[in-house]
Image (spheres, helix red, strand yellow):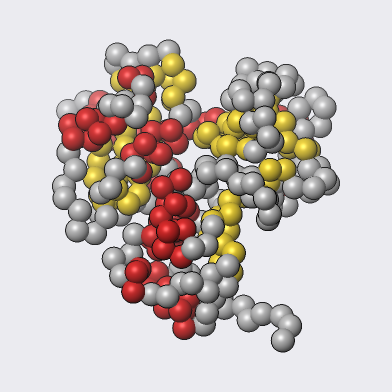
């Protein structure tokens, strides 16, 4: 028998998808991190046979290491992570199909593609391996430019023809890429560069946390302060600000410590299910505008 059946869904409905894993013996599944988070934290996940899964891919946003590890423990299937953008048609790196893999990495450059980490101060200067830089990409898959927008095209390219992704990343000595965060999401706290994803990864280690998004809010003393928006797992005990700070004490630097938390029933997501920070920034901006408005 050749070929395979493709099972399509108009939207991600957790219960339906998990039932079909078992009923249709699904072997391949591609999703975004929030989908895998929901699957890994489903209260009846251990009652569903997902052993047919052989290849699963994650993209669209960084995948929390804790979620990948939990998914593997449940299914025996490794989560392969990739990186790419619409402008790169739409890929750039992926976990090697065979051989070595590294937790937290979005893999290595695909054949014919060159990835280069550039200085955050000057994208025309390459940084050494192991150092943080803006991930820039060159290859036949990269767009020629933005339609009828020469200015945006010019600003998105380096002098030597690499496309600037806007992602902060590290390439290690073995060529594996690790996404740190988006340059636009980076915070400046007390003079230090702080990356929300670093804080999110630490919070994901808390056994009660299902989802988290961290953004920066104004702080009179630090300039900016991290605020964590959290969704707890079903049945979890309430999580207080002080309890979370104690949990994070040995996991984060003082300059990275959260300033506020907001525990919610749901966190905003995009149409494809990725966690979205835009609504959170908009809420905080509206709140500040209301607080400063004349009575």
Task: Name the quadrant of the C terminus.
Answer: top left
The residue shown at (82%, 27%) is 160
Please say if 117 is above or below 82: above
Q: Which of 88 and 148 is in front in this view?
A: 88
The residue shown at (49%, 63%) is 76
Q: Which of 188 and 45 is in front in this view?
A: 45
Task: Name the quadrant of the N terminus.
Answer: bottom right
- Residue 249 appears anywhere in the view: yes
Counting from the top left corner in percent of width and height, residue 171 is at 64, 32
Q: In this view, does 63 lie to the left or right of 262?
A: right
Where residue 46 sits, quadrant-wise, is bottom left
Counting from the top left corner in percent of width and height, residue 181 is at 52, 34
- Residue 280 appears anywhere in the view: no
Please say if 137 is above or below 50: above
Q: In this view, does 70 lie to the left or right of 142?
A: left
Q: Nearer the viewer, residue 227 or 51?
A: 51
The residue shown at (72%, 43%) is 109
Counting from the top left corner in percent of width and height, residue 38 is at 38, 60
Q: How many labels does the image show?
A: 0
Counting from the top left corner in percent of width and height, residue 146 is at 74, 43
Q: Is residue 132 left or right of residue 126?
A: left
**Residue farthest to the front, as pictured:** 99
Where residue 262 sits, quadrant-wise, is top left
The residue shown at (70%, 46%) is 92
């Amino acid at each position: 028998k050749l070929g395979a059946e493709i099972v399509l869904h108009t939207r991600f409905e957790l219960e339906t998808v998990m039932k079909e894993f078992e009923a249709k013996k699904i072997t391949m599944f591609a999703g975004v991190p929030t989908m895998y988070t929901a699957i890994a934290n489903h209260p009846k996940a251990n009652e569903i046979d997902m052993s047919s899964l052989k290849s699963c891919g994650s993209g669209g946003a960084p995948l929390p290491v804790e979620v990948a590890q939990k998914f593997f423990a449940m299914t025996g299937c490794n989560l392969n992570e990739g990186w790419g953008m619409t402008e790169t048609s739409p890929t750039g790196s992926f976990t090697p199909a065979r051989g070595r893999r590294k937790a937290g990495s979005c893999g290595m450059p695909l054949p014919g593609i060159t990835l280069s980490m550039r200085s955050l101060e000057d994208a025309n200067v390459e940084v050494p391996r192991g150092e943080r830089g803006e991930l820039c990409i060159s290859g036949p898959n990269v767009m020629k430019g933005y339609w009828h927008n020469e200015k945006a095209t010019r600003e998105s390219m380096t002098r030597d023809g690499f496309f600037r992704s806007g992602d902060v990343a590290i390439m290690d000595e073995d060529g594996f890429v690790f996404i740190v965060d988006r340059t636009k999401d980076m915070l400046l706290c007390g003079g230090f560069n702080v990356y929300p994803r670093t804080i999110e990864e630490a919070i994901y280690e808390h056994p009660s946390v299902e989802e988290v998004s961290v953004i920066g809010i104004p702080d009179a003393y630090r300039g900016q302060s991290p605020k964590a928006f959290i969704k707890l797992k079903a049945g979890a005990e309430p999580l207080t600000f002080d309890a979370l700070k104690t949990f994070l004490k040995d996991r984060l630097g003082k300059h990275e410590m959260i300033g506020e938390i907001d525990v919610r029933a749901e966190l905003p997501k995009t149409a494809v299910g990725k966690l979205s920070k835009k609504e959170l920034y908009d809420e905080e901006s509206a709140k500040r505008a209301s607080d400063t408005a004349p009575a």
